[in-house]
Amino acid sequence: MTAINRTGISLAPERAKSMLHAIRNGTDGASRVDEGEASALRVAENRCAEPVGTMPPMVAPEKGTPALLLDRLGERLAFERSGARLYELLILKLEGGGAFPGGPSRDDLEHIRSEELAHFALISSVLGSCGGDPTAITPGANQGATESMGLVQVLSDPRISLAEGLHSVLVAELVDNAGWSMLVDLLEQAGMPEHAEACAEALKSEADHLAKVQSWVRAHAQQRLRA
């Protein structure tokens, strides 16, 4: 039995009026929030906060690879690892009976997961050849892992269906495509055409992933609309 959703304020209009009155006038025990003070506190914290991470020493400093490029490679590495995990979780959703007309098959999901793992291996190789350490956590890798953590949490929730999970994966694929595009540009500017070409091929695969996920999300939305 599905519980009644009681989150809307319109379900209790009189109480809503009383609550809003208390907020606006600081009555009934409600205290006004000084937005200026809160903003000033956040600004002060931002100014004195430690960085999200630091760059590790290069394994081969003689290669002279820009730190920014190593950081972007680290970020891609972290995100591809999370990407593979997302598709593993989608496969479990599918096995749990979440298939729908126009949606992905197990072969579809396994194929994309395999390509995500291949992209992880590619970045690992490029990072090592540029003098970096694939096992080190760069600032970008730290941020990327944190950003994708929320998506993994959504897909790990048993209440989330395959179709709902695909929406979260769509978010990941949009970010993924933008990240690969930027990486290709940076590799070209750094004078690394072979690496840029390899990553450009990976970008083509990622564009295909995005198109497929978009089609699955669209198919489910159209199905719901017709129901």
Image (tube, rainbow, N blue to C red):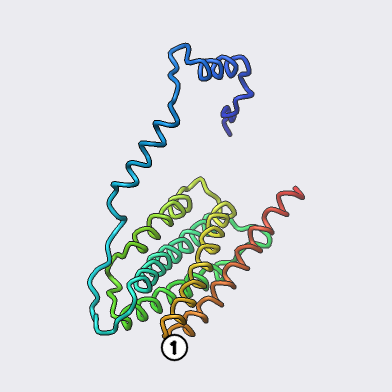
Residue 1 visible, this angle = no
* Residue that lies at the very extreme toward the right in this rendered image: 226
Q: Point out residue 211 in the picture as x, y percentages from the top left corner.
A: 63, 68
Instruction: Pick the residue in front: 161 or 167.
Output: 167
Q: Is residue 200 above or below residue 57?
A: below
Q: Is residue 185 above or below residue 86?
A: below
Residue at 60% x, 25% y is 9
Q: Is residue 63 left or right of residue 152?
A: left
The amino acid pointed to by label 1 is Glu
Q: Which residue is mark 1?
A: 194
Indicate the secondary structure of the residue bearing disc 1. Answer: helix
Quadrant location of the N terminus in the rendered image? top right
Res 141 → quadrant? bottom left
> How many numbered callouts?
1
Badge 1 local density, few (<14 within 10 Å), some, or many (20+)? few
Residue plotted at (61% across, 14% down): 14
* Residue 225 picture location, percent across and down: 74, 49
**Residue 120 seen anywhere in this rendered image of the structure:** yes
Q: Position of residue 54 (x, y in %)?
A: 27, 62
* Nearest to the observer: residue 211 or residue 114: 211
Which residue appears at 38% of the width and 59% of the height?
Answer: 145
For image coordinates 27% across by 74% down, the residue present is 133
Residue 15 drawn at (x, y percent): 57, 16
Q: Which of 194 and 161 lies nearest the eye of the viewer?
A: 194
Answer with left or right where residue 17 lies relative to residue 218.
left
